[in-house]
Amino acid sequence: MDRLVITIHPTPPGEGLLRVADAMQQVIDALQILEQAERSLISPQESFEWRLERASAGSPFTVVAVAESINPAIDVAPHVKRVKAEVSRGLRNFIGRGTPPRWMDSEGMLVFRRVLSRNQNGVGRTDIDFDIGAGMNDIMSIDRAQAEAGIRAIVALNVLDIEELPERDSFGEVEGLMVAAGRYRSRPAVQIRSELYGFVWCILSRTVIERFGNEHKMADVWEGKTVGVHGRLSYAIGGKLSRIDVIDMREIIAALPIDLDSVLDPNFTGGMDPHEYLRQLHGGELA
């Protein structure tokens, strides 16, 4: 139930050969769609990641991916099943009815459009076996006709073509769970997982290093915590956040759940029926 099998079929004879690079990119984009759904549907504490278990470079090109929990103490099987079911249902409805999934943003549509476009040029058919079980149709097949229908659905939404967005910088703060500390292009950095942007490397400024120590010390202090990272946000072409040059960091403390028993007052209405109490209160009969 935690597996996903993606099979990339070649084009019919005479229409060119399937390139391994195209097949592998098709797999990567398909997994990226599932990861976006996961970020929208699953809490960070229940998150998981896809690990490529095996691949067959023959024809057809087949990859088996397995979902692994980021926190080994959490059983992610039901969450994996939910994500796969939502993606299967959402993509089918998008292609067949033109209704985008509620968890898919414009960047996700761009990724999905790339998947569909390859099925019109270079890929004969893409099969995704969601392995959902429970009598559901597990395998979703995208051929050229379905790819055309999906692209028409995306175009009909008149979505901003984010491919045309240029590289840009801005200043601000991004919240995320710190998952690693190490080096990014030989510079001290930490990695966070943001609900909006996914995994982002955050390059540490000299000031931050002086405050908290090297990257190993940063891991001791921050890893596993939700942090707010303030600094220069660098966006790549297409609007994806590529990195953050950190000016400051702060821990974000989640609000504690309220214990209703500790605040419940059984004598609040003085033994009066709640409806009668509210009637007298609104009527000005209570002092």
Image (cartoon, helix red, strand yellow):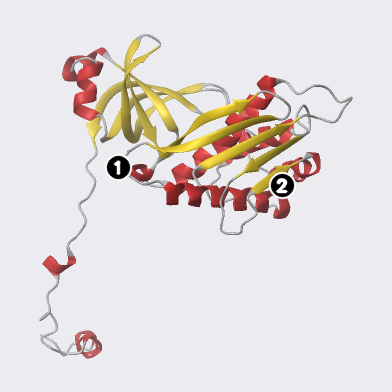
Closer to us: 248 or 1: 1
Up the image or down, 248 lies above or below 159; here it is above
Question: Secondary structure beneath disc 2?
Answer: helix
Residue 196: percent from the left, percent from the top? 44, 38
Q: Is residue 239 left or right of residue 14?
A: left
Tell me the SS state at disc 1: loop
Mark 1 or mark 2: name the one nearer the start of the chain: 1
Residue displayed at 70% across by 32% down: 8
Q: Please state the horizontal and vertical placement of residue 4, each as a whole percent of the image.
A: 56, 40
Residue furthest out toward the right: 14
Residue 244 in view in this figure: yes
Q: Amino acid at mark 1?
A: Ala
Residue type (three-letter) at the residue carrying disc 2: Ala
Image position of 140 with respect to 187: above or below: below
Q: Residue 74: where, in percent of width, then height? A: 33, 45
Dot label at residue 153: 2
Left or right: 253, with 152 as reference point = left
Query: Residue at coordinates 50% horizontally, 22% vertically from top-left?
Result: 168
Q: Which residue is painted at 33% across and 36% down in the image?
A: 175
Residue neighbourhood size for the residue with mark 1, other residues' Cα within 10 Å, grouped as few (<14), some (14–19), many (≥20) = few
Q: Nearer the viewer, mark 1 or mark 2?
A: 1
The quadrant in which the C terminus is found is: bottom left
Residue for point 64% across, 41% down = 128
Percent x, y of residue 3: 53, 41
Label number found at residue 73: 1
The quadrant where residue 271 appears: bottom left
- The answer for how far apart the CA atoms under marks 1 and 2 are is 41 Å
Crowd tier of the residue under label 2, counting other residues whose Cα lies within 10 Å: few below 14, some 14–19, many 20 or above: some
* Residue nearer the viewer, 155 or 136: 136
